[in-house]
Amino acid sequence: MAGTGPEELPPAAHTIREFEHGYEEESRLRGFRSACGFVTATWGLVCPACGARDLAEHALSGRGRIVAGTVQTVPSDEFLNDAPYAYVVVELDEGGRMTGWMPGVRRDADLHLGDRVRWRPSYKPGVIFERDDGAAPEGRP
Ligand SMILES: [Zn+2]
């Protein structure tokens, strides 16, 4: 049936499970990079920028800036003891965006778009970001 079925995709550089295992147990964030330079933190098989099937594993620092967020006051069960907290979208320094949460950010007034944050490995569920008051990486404002 050559030519009638879907094209076969190459294997991914890592699985979704390996991605989750990385931040939950190995203190590392796995992303993907295409030869075109596009970096993403979202698991996939094809570069969303150029369509190439060349995504290779790319280590992410977990540092970036808050580009969107909200304070959650009605959490799901696993976050009951941490509410309220901020749920944020972070633009990573390498490229790509990740969602995560920030324990201890309890009011909208304490959540500022553009603030620098960094990923903090934790025994708690999900991806946790904390404020990063350190110097910006070289070449960044
Ligand atoms: Zn690409």
Image (cartoon, rainbow, N blue to C red):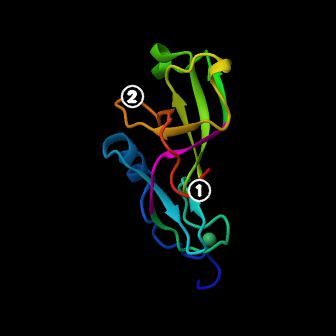
Q: Is residue 133 magenta?
A: no
Bounds of the magenta span? 58-67
Q: Look at the picture and state if 91 lies above or below 106.
A: below
Residue found at x 42% / y 60%: 14
Q: Quadrant of ligand 1?
A: bottom right
In-image side of 128 versus 106 (left or right): left
In-image side of 137 versus 22 (left or right): right
Residue 23 lies in what quarter of the image?
A: top left
In the picture as drawn, the residue positioned furthest to the left comes out as 26
Q: Quadrant of the N terminus?
A: bottom right
Where's residue 50, x and y in %? Answer: 67, 72
The rendered magenta stretch, by its main secondary structure, is classed as strand
Where's residue 92, x and y in %? Answer: 56, 49
Q: Look at the picture and state if 84 lies above or below 38.
A: above
Residue found at x 45% / y 62%: 58
For badge 2, the amino acid type reads: Lys
In the picture as drawn, the residue positioned furthest to the bottom comes out as 2
Inter-mark Cα distance, 2 to 1: 25 Å
Q: Is residue 61 magenta?
A: yes
